[in-house]
Image (cartoon, rainbow, N blue to C red):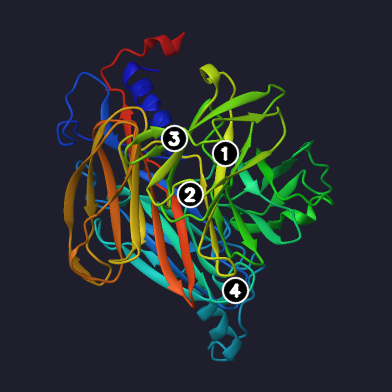
């Protein structure tokens, strides 16, 4: 095997590590604005996203949104398509959208299909039809679905649509358990997830949604950890998620123990899945709980709403080591230590919860958690309540990953959108671009300076002549690291509906070794 071939394999391996699956060609580095003779930073050329089933409520109204920012150096061709997981065709083409054997319609003596055959053909055509397909980078597209039949989505993007492809689903539920606004960013498949902040209590209805994008079944273990350690589960091991399908699992059916605060650990034995927890409350609405950032000795939970009435921190440290977490709040004026909650003690392998009250007190804020010397890894999330007693709504903010290059939030509106950005370790400059609207409008861009140790609720730009919703793309220019979240809010019947999504890096760029680089060591 020659050195050029080895170099291209290394590039493809790097892309696969970033997106879960990826393809790489040999683009002109100068066309991508990169110099030759060294690793080039190039747009990824293929990526995938998974969106969980939005709701089990007949009153749910869901909006799906898909968007790719304009990326310099990207291919001039490609597609970005989201389809219903239940409508995915089997790999060998011998099964229909529901996973059953295809049944041909009967024909007349003249060879014409009967009414049954026509219906089957129409069904097959519907199964192949995308729920959402992008037409051009820089402009979001939306689709709507009502009731409990709104599907989980599986999608791929390639070519000019792959770099920075983002999708979001936002659901409004008018009444019942989990009423309010529920939002979640669609995510890539992976093999391990942590969800501190879930519950098996009688007042909660929490589901872990597992979505398998692949042609073979995935096998998943679900571990639950409460205040005294791991909970005994009855059917949490060896859960099979069929190929190209979605599986919601009610957490309270996995254990007989009723606990208010639980950490969920999802481990994939074979294959890969997308995972998210939908946490629904009888009294305080509900929202999606995305996975926490990987266990770490330093965590940032960005964008706690300034009018939060109550903040409840749930944290967990894997293993046997105890840890005393240092707690600080990154406020607009800088890092401060909340009175009475300077340090929180976590016991190894046990979920701990702490009520922090009205932590932000009318100002933007982000939690910064630090273990001594960063030696003990931790996962964490906060549950936030807004509104007055009897008319409160809840949302969740997990520990987030930093925005290394670029991140996008979708479904924004001219009113009711708050973009919160924090730079806990050093000052940073960011660029924020408001895309064209789904139904019209001209993109707008602004730059902002975020002071070290602060959180800022910034006045994000709005497209000129906006019609419909739009995307907000945050790019780091200098300094950092930078963390961000976006809050959507409205008021219905005196209840403050809201949902918060941290902005993960879109992983749209990857360093690829130049083909002339000496990788002969791989031949040894």
- Of marks 2 and 1, which one's residue comes earlier in the chain? 2
Q: How crowded is mark 4: few (under 14 residues within 10 Å), some or many (20 or more)?
A: some
Residue under numbered circle 1? 380
Q: In this view, does 398 lie above or below 106?
A: above
Tell me where residue 442 appears, x and y as whole percent: 16, 63
The quadrant in which the N terminus is found is: top left
Distance between the alpha carbons at the discs numbered 2 and 1: 19 Å
Q: Name the residue under label 4.
A: 148
Q: Is 179 rendered above or below residue 376?
A: below
Q: Residues within 10 Å of mark 1 (few under 14, many from 20)?
A: many
Q: Measuring from the top left, give residue 449's x and y in whole percent.
A: 22, 38
Query: Closer to the camera: disc 3 or disc 2?
Result: 2
Q: Residue 113, can we see it?
A: yes
Question: In the displayed structure, does residue 496 sit left or right of residue 469?
Answer: right
The secondary structure type at the circle numbered 3 is helix
Residue labelled with disc 2: 187
Label 2, residues with CA under 10 Å away: few <14, some 14-19, many ≥20: many
Q: Which element is circle 4 on?
A: helix
Apparent side of residue 24 relative to residue 390 in the rendered image (left or right) = left
For the residues bearing labels 1 and 3, Cβ distance under 8 angstroms = no
Residue marked by disc 3: 16
């Amino acid at each position: 095997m020659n050195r050029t071939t080895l170099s291209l394999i290394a590039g493809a391996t790097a892309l696969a590590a970033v997106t879960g699956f990826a393809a790489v060609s040999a683009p002109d580095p100068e066309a991508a604005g990169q110099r030759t003779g060294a690793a080039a930073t190039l747009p990824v050329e293929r990526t995938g996203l998974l969106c969980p089933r939005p709701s089990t409520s007949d009153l749910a109204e869901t909006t799906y949104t898909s968007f790719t920012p304009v990326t310099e150096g990207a291919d001039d061709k490609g597609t970005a398509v989201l389809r219903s997981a239940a409508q995915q065709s089997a790999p060998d083409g011998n099964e229909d959208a529901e996973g059953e054997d295809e049944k041909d319609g009967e024909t007349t003596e003249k060879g014409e299909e009967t009414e049954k055959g026509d219906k089957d053909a129409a069904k097959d055509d519907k199964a192949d039809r995308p729920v959402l397909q992008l037409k051009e980078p820089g402009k979001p597209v939306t689709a709507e679905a009502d009731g409990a039949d709104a599907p989980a989505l599986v999608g791929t993007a390639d070519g000019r649509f792959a770099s920075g492809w983002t999708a979001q689903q936002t659901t409004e539920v008018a009444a019942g358990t989990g009423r309010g606004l529920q939002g979640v960013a669609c995510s890539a498949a992976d093999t391990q997830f942590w969800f501190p902040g879930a519950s098996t209590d009688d007042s909660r209805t929490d589901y872990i949604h597992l979505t398998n994008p692949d042609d073979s079944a995935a096998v998943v273990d679900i571990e639950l950890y409460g205040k005294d350690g791991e909970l005994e589960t009855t059917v949490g091991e060896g859960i099979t998620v069929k190929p190209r399908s979605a599986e919601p699992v009610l957490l309270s059916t996995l254990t007989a123990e009723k606990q208010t605060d639980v950490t969920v650990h999802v481990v994939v034995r074979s294959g890969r899945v997308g995972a998210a927890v939908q946490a629904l409350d009888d009294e305080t609405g509900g929202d999606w709980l995305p996975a926490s950032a990987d266990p770490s000795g330093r965590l940032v939970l960005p964008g706690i709403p300034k009018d939060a009435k109550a903040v409840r921190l749930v944290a967990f440290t894997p293993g046997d080591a105890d840890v005393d977490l240092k707690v600080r709040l990154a406020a607009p004026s800088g890092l401060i230590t909340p009175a009475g909650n300077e340090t929180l003690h976590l016991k190894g392998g046990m979920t701990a919860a702490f009520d922090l009250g009205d932590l932000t007190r009318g100002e933007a804020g982000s939690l910064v958690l630090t273990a001594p010397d960063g030696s003990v890894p931790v996962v964490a999330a906060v549950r936030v309540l807004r509104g007055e007693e009897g008319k409160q709504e809840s949302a969740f903010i997990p520990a987030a990953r930093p925005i290394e290059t670029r991140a996008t939030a979708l479904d924004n509106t001219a009113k009711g959108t708050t973009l919160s950005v924090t730079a806990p370790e050093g000052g940073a400059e960011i660029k924020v671009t408001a895309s064209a609207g789904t139904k019209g409008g001209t993109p707008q861009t602004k730059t902002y300076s975020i002071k070290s140790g602060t959180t800022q609720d910034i006045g994000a730009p709005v497209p000129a002549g906006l019609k419909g919703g739009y995307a907000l793309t945050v790019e780091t220019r200098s300094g950092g690291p930078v963390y961000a979240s976006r809050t959507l809010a409205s008021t219905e019947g005196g209840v403050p509906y809201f949902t918060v999504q941290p902005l993960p890096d879109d992983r749209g760029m990857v360093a690829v070794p130049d083909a002339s680089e000496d990788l002969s060591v791989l031949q040894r």
